[in-house]
Image (tube, grey):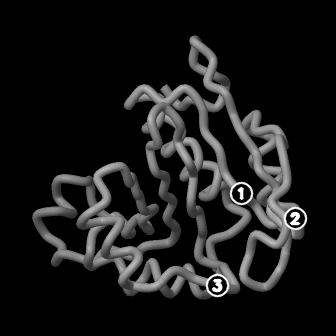
Amino acid sequence: MRLEDLPQVMAIDQASFPQPWTEQSYRFELEENHNAHFIVALEAPPTPHPGWLQRWLAPATPRKVIGFAGFWLVVDEAHINTIAVHPHWRRQGIGERLLTAILERARAINAVSATLEVRVSNLPAQKMYAKFGFVEVGRRKRYYRDGEDALLMTLRFEPNPPDWQMS
């Protein structure tokens, strides 16, 4: 994720969550928090020509962010703090690819587990996390500003790469 992605990231955040992050929060994460790791999913531009020819002939196209995810590395734990996909791009596997990418990044920097909070009402996200091996380990009462509880889920990394790893 780059600073220039923030307007698009914030638009996706606002379309995805009742209490989106502020621009100031994202800026802090990108500029000052050295334990923060954020990625974006980009829409692939159409390529009517082979890749090298497209880059040579076509004008530079602006990045179009369609999703993002982030985590903090806290000692040896990846705490996933956000993952969202633009409403137009949902149900196409992008959330799973983002989750795969941040889990692989966490493993690469020696995390031994990943944790996250998810709204008790967000059943699609819970289903995706369970598919990756996350298990519910607790509940945070009235965790969100609107009073909704959060489920605390965790994934312990195995010594051998799991099925979700893309390698």
Q: Are marks 3 and 1 in contact (CB under 8 Å)?
A: no
Q: Quadrant of residue 65?
A: bottom left
Query: Within 10 angstroms of label 2, few (less than 14), some, or many (20 or more) residues?
Result: some
Residue drawn at 46 percent across, 50 percent down = 72
Give the mark nearest the N terminus, 3 or 1.
3
Query: Residue at image x 57%, y 63%?
Result: 82
Looking at the rendered structure, the number of numbered marks drawn on it comes to 3
Q: Residue at x 85, y 55 (%)?
A: 139
Kindly report the distance in space between the C-alpha atoms of the residues bearing marks 3 and 1: 14 Å
Real-space Cα distance between discs 2 and 3? Answer: 15 Å
Q: In this image, 31 relative to 7: left or right?
A: left
User: What's the amino acid at mark 2?
Assistant: Val
Q: CA distance from mark 2 to mark 1?
A: 9 Å
| Circle 1 Cα neighbour tier, 10 Å, few/some/many (<14 / 14–19 / ≥20) | many
Q: Secondary structure at mark 1?
A: strand
- Mark 3 lies on a secondary structure that is loop
In the rendered image, residue 104, in percent from the top left (x then y), is placed at 49, 35
Name the outermost residue toward the top. Answer: 159
* Disc 3 target residue: 19
The structure residue drawn at horizontal position 36% and vertical position 49%, both measured from the top left corner, is 35
Q: Decide: is 32 above or below 109.
A: below
The residue where tag 1 is placed is 117
The mark that comes first in sequence, 2 or 3, is 3
Where does residue 106 sit, x and y in percent of width and height? 46, 36
The image shows residue 110 at horizontal and vertical percentages of: 42, 26
Amino acid type of the residue tagged 3 in the rendering: Gln
Where disc 2 sits, the SS reads loop
Residue bearing the label numbered 2: 120
Name the spot of residue 111 as percent of width and height, x first.
48, 30
Identify which amino acid the numbered label 1 is placed on: Glu
